[in-house]
Image (cartoon, rainbow, N blue to C red):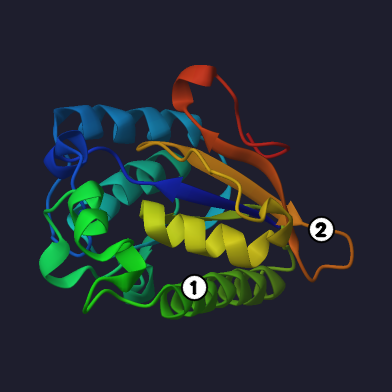
Amino acid sequence: MHVFLIRHGETALNAAGVLRGQLDVPLNATGEAEAVALGEVFRGVPLSAVVSSPLRRAAGTASRVASASGALVTIDDRLRDRFYGEWAGHSLEQVEGLFGSIDSAPFVEAWQLLETRAEEAFCDAIDAAKADGAAAASVEGGVALVTHDAVLRALLMRLVPALGSAKLHLPTGSWSELVPASGGMQWRPVRLGELPASGCRPAGLG
């Protein structure tokens, strides 16, 4: 089982350097191009499912990946971006200047809650793929989750504890690839924050 964690393409809010959160903005022209490039990365890759956040920037990216791979898109609300409340649309520096950290700002979704819902969505996607594979007498292929920077970071911290507090560089329009680690209890990163321009393809599937 290969799992791909994909960050959506760029939006006007990304370009402005402000918190997006659950503001439902579409891809901008750069983001559309990034989504198309991601589709080319996954062209012909046997994905059993593409699971996406419901927000337009993620769903639009997911549709490109799914179309290229021949998979169907499933929406999972648990992959929605972190809730920043009234601070969405403000810069991180502004919020940190007021409260010291984004985690201390009022009404911001607790990081642990974000980790928990992201991990639940991940596990359910894997279980569904395994069930479908068993029904088809095959578990080959991969699953792609298309979501947001904060969700990806939370998920990776849960799935790959060895990353610790490492600064992960996960640009818009990037993809990461995980495979089960020895023993099957954790996951091992094969790629992290890979951009289509690198020319890399999914390991063993593309």
Taking the spot 36% from the left edge, 72% from the top edge, the residue there is: 76
Q: Is residue 200 left or right of residue 10?
A: right
Q: Is residue 195 left or right of residue 163?
A: left
Residue closest to the eye, 110 or 61: 110
x and y, in percent, of residue 97 in the image? 22, 54
For the residue marked with disc 1, what is the amino acid? Glu
Quarter of the image holding residue 200?
Answer: top right
Q: Which residue is mark 1?
A: 115
Q: Is residue 63 left or right of residue 193?
A: left
Disc 1 residue crowd, few under 14, some 14–19, many 20+, Cα 10 Å: many
Quarter of the image holding residue 140?
Answer: bottom right
The answer to whether residue 50 is seen in the rendering is no
- Identify the element where label 2 is drawn: loop
Q: Nearer the viewer, mark 1 or mark 2?
A: 1
x and y, in percent, of residue 151 in the image? 42, 61
x and y, in percent, of residue 181 in the image? 81, 58
Upstream in sequence: badge 1 or badge 2:
1
For residue 33, above or below residue 184: above
For residue 195, above or below residue 59: above
x and y, in percent, of residue 108 in the image? 26, 74
Q: Which residue is mark 2?
A: 181
Picture quarter with the N terminus: bottom right
Taking the spot 66% from the left edge, 51% from the top edge, the residue there is: 178
Taking the spot 56% from the left edge, 40% from the top edge, the residue there is: 45
Taking the spot 24% from the left edge, 37% from the top edge, the residue there is: 10
The answer to whether residue 151 is seen in the rendering is yes
Disc 2 residue crowd, few under 14, some 14–19, many 20+, Cα 10 Å: few
> Mark 1 and mark 2: span between their CA atoms?
20 Å
Say the numbered circle drawn on residue 192: none
For the residue marked with disc 2, what is the amino acid? Ala
- Identify the element where label 1 is drawn: helix
Picture quarter with the C terminus: top right
